[in-house]
Each structure stands twice: as structure tokens, then as C-alpha cells.
């Protein structure tokens, strides 16, 4: 079951078109709409090399760095709960696909 998280419209860069991240099993989809078109990027959780969450007083920022050479995905204005849920979903997907240690 996919989970979608949207940035708050009260934060900079998200007033008209808020960014969103959808976590669906082993896939992460980042979407940012614009006046003409949109930017969308889908990555596999196994290609996430770093997940960094910066908590502010109200909003959190999330940065996902990949091992595939693409630019890091940065989303500003997430609720603290949403940022932690995305981070947990990535860790769980990476842990489920990791080979067992013998």
C-alpha cells in the first residue's frame, strides 16, 4: 500500500505546488509540479546511500542521496512525523532486501 507525504504549503518553494514523496514497497517517487509540467524521479530503496533528516521547530527537511549518481532528492517543509516515516520506510525496505548474515 503506497504512502504519500506532502510538504506544507506554508514553507518556501511549496506555496503553489508542494513537493511530494510516495513510498510504495521498495520504490520512492519524488514529484514536484511546476506551471508547465513537473519533475518526477523514482528510485529503488536499495540505491539510497544516505537519508538525512533535519528537524526544525515546526518543519523537517529530508535529503535522500543515491548511489546511482543522480542529484540528491531534497524536500523541505515535511512534518516531523512524515520525515521520520519516510526514513523508517527506507530503512525497513533496505533491511528486508539485505542478505542474511551467517
Image (spheres, rainbow, N blue to C red):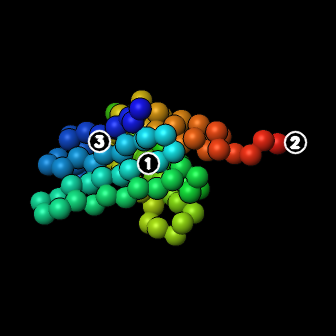
Instruction: Count the numbered circles shown.
Output: 3
Label 3 or label 1, whichever lies nearer to me, is: 1
Residue 28 is labelled as 1
User: How far, Cα to Cα, is label 3 from label 1?
Assistant: 15 Å
Answer with the quarter of the image where residue 21 lies. Answer: top left
* Residue bearing mark 3: 7
Q: Is residue 27 left or right of residue 14?
A: right
Where the N terminus falls, by quadrant? top left
Structural crowding at the residue carrying mark 1, measured as other residues with C-alpha within 10 Å and reported as few (<14), some (14–19) or many (≥20) = many
Residue placed farthest to the right in the image?
A: 102
* x, y percent for residue 63: 46, 52
- Sequence-first disc among 1 and 2: 1
User: How far, Cα to Cα, is label 3 from label 2?
Assistant: 41 Å
* x, y percent for residue 70: 47, 67
Residue 45 is labelled as none
User: How far, Cα to Cα, is label 1 from label 2?
Assistant: 30 Å
Could you tell me which residue is drawn at 54 percent across and 66 percent down? 68
The secondary structure type at the circle numbered 1 is strand
The secondary structure type at the circle numbered 3 is loop
Could you tell me which residue is drawn at 25 percent across and 39 percent down? 8
Say which of 23 and 84 sits in front: 23
- Sequence-first disc among 3 and 1: 3
Say which of 46 and 70 sits in front: 46
Q: Is residue 2 left or right of residue 47?
A: left
* Residue bearing mark 2: 102
Structural crowding at the residue carrying mark 2, measured as other residues with C-alpha within 10 Å and reported as few (<14), some (14–19) or many (≥20) = few
* x, y percent for residue 83: 43, 38
- Sequence-first disc among 3 and 2: 3
Amino acid at each position: 500500500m503506497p504512502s504519500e507525504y506532502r510538504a506544507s504549503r506554508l514553507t518556501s518553494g511549496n506555496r503553489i505546488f508542494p513537493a511530494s514523496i510516495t513510498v510504495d514497497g521498495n520504490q520512492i517517487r519524488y514529484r514536484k509540479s511546476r506551471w508547465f509540467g513537473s519533475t518526477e524521479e523514482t528510485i529503488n530503496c536499495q540505491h539510497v546511500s544516505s537519508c538525512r533528516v533535519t528537524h526544525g521547530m515546526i518543519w523537517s527537511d529530508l535529503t535522500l542521496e543515491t548511489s546511482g549518481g543522480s542529484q540528491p532528492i531534497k524536500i523541505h517543509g515535511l512534518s516531523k512525523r512524515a520525515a521520520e516515516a519516510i526514513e523508517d520506510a527506507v530503512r525497513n525496505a533496505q533491511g528486508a532486501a539485505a542478505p542474511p548474515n551467517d
